[in-house]
Image: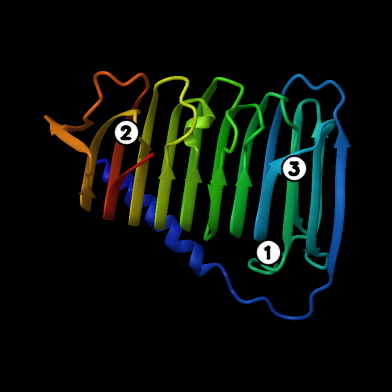
């Protein structure tokens, strides 16, 4: 059964809690701001890494390639900015060879990225409270991975590019994604471990899309706007499905307007334990 993949994600997510001891000793906090002007970049591959604390992402002011403000404990962490060719790596890293798990939970990272520069974006963050707004960014691909977090991702404006794929790997988290239609992605993959997940499929759908969703343990809401055709198949172990507004035909569930809908979303659901609820919104 494909639900083994969801169980595997669950095991990884539970492991996050084992590695978060309380910070000990005094901390020496520092705040820095770093930025770079645009200089004719045609495309950009961006990697963002951040361990714990508050994490915020949004679009930059015109003319900026990036702007990053950090608050961090300088005894154990230092900022990282690497820019070479079309590759940009932003975040913090540990000082020396010691591992300082959980010691930056009072830190903050506020990052702004260039508008309208075609971007391949990879974001990895751990025990954070994240507020990520991707509206205004020109995204060709997106990978987002979280640990034990409370995260909201919003695509507040339509993506100007035709995106190949977008993936969200969610650990032990309270996770909400809004305006997924604005990604303009051909395929969206969501893998959730433990927690509560809400996926809003509203936004400007300019092409049909396939969506793969796997869940370990928890509850999930799939929120669809009226007028978008939905086809859902499920491979579940001990998971309940509240299929409001869907009609089962054969091995799949269909929205009532599936045949006549201008845009169609195909959902492949793989769940282990918990509950999944379908909600229709205007």
Question: Eyeballing the image, is 28 above or below 220?
Answer: below
Which residue is painted at 26% across and 34% down in the image? 232
Q: Quadrant of residue 118?
A: top right
Label disc, if present, on residue 99 of the rendered structure: 1
- Look at the image and tell me in which quarter the C terminus lies: top left
From the viewer's perspective, tell me whether residue 265 is left or right of residue 170.
Answer: left
- Mark positioned earlier in the residue sequence (2 or 3): 3
> 193 or 227: nearer the eye?
227
**Image quarter for residue 139?**
top right
Looking at the image, can residue 222 be seen? yes
Residue, far left: 250
Point out which mark residue 179 bears: none
Residue 7 in percent (x, y) is at 33, 52
Can residue 95 be seen by looking at this rendering?
Answer: no
Q: Does dot 1 land on a helix, a strand or a loop?
A: loop
Q: Which residue is mark 2?
A: 267
Q: Earlier in the sequence, mark 2 or mark 1?
A: 1
Whole-angstrom CA distance, mark 2 to mark 1, is 40 Å
N-term mark: 3 or 1: 1
Q: Residue placed farthest to the front in the image?
A: 282
Which residue in the protein does label 3 denote?
A: 112
User: Depth check: 14 or 232 in front?
Assistant: 232
Give how far across and how far down residue 259 sits, in percent: 24, 19
């Amino acid at each position: 059964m494909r639900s083994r993949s969801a169980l595997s994600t669950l095991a990884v997510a539970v492991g996050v809690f084992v590695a978060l001891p309380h910070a000990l000793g005094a901390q020496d906090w520092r705040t820095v701001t770093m930025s770079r002007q645009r200089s004719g970049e045609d495309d950009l591959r961006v990697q963002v890494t951040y361990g714990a604390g508050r994490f915020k992402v949004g679009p930059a002011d015109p003319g900026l390639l990036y702007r990053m403000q950090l608050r961090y404990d300088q005894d154990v962490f230092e900022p990282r900015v690497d820019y070479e060719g079309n590759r940009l790596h932003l975040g913090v890293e540990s000082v020396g060879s010691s591992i300082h798990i959980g010691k930056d939970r009072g830190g903050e990272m506020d990052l702004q990225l260039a508008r309208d520069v075609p971007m391949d974006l990879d974001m990895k963050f751990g025990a954070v409270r994240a507020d990520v707004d991707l509206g205004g960014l020109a995204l060709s691909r997106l990978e987002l991975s979280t640990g034990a977090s409370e995260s909201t991702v919003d695509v507040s404006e339509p993506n100007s590019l035709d995106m190949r794929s977008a993936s969200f790997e969610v650990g032990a988290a309270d996770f909400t994604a809004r305006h997924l239609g604005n990604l303009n992605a051909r395929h969206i993959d969501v893998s959730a471990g433990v927690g509560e997940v809400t996926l809003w499929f509203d936004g400007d759908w300019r092409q049909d899309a396939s969506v793969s969703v796997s869940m370990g343990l928890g509850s999930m809401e799939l929120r669809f706007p009226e007028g978008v055709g939905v086809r859902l198949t499920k491979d579940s172990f001990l998971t309940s499905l509240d299929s409001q507004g869907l009609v089962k035909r054969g091995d799949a569930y269909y929205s009532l307007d599936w045949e006549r809908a201008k845009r169609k979303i195909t959902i492949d659901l793989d769940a282990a334990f918990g509950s999944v609820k379908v909600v229709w919104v205007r």
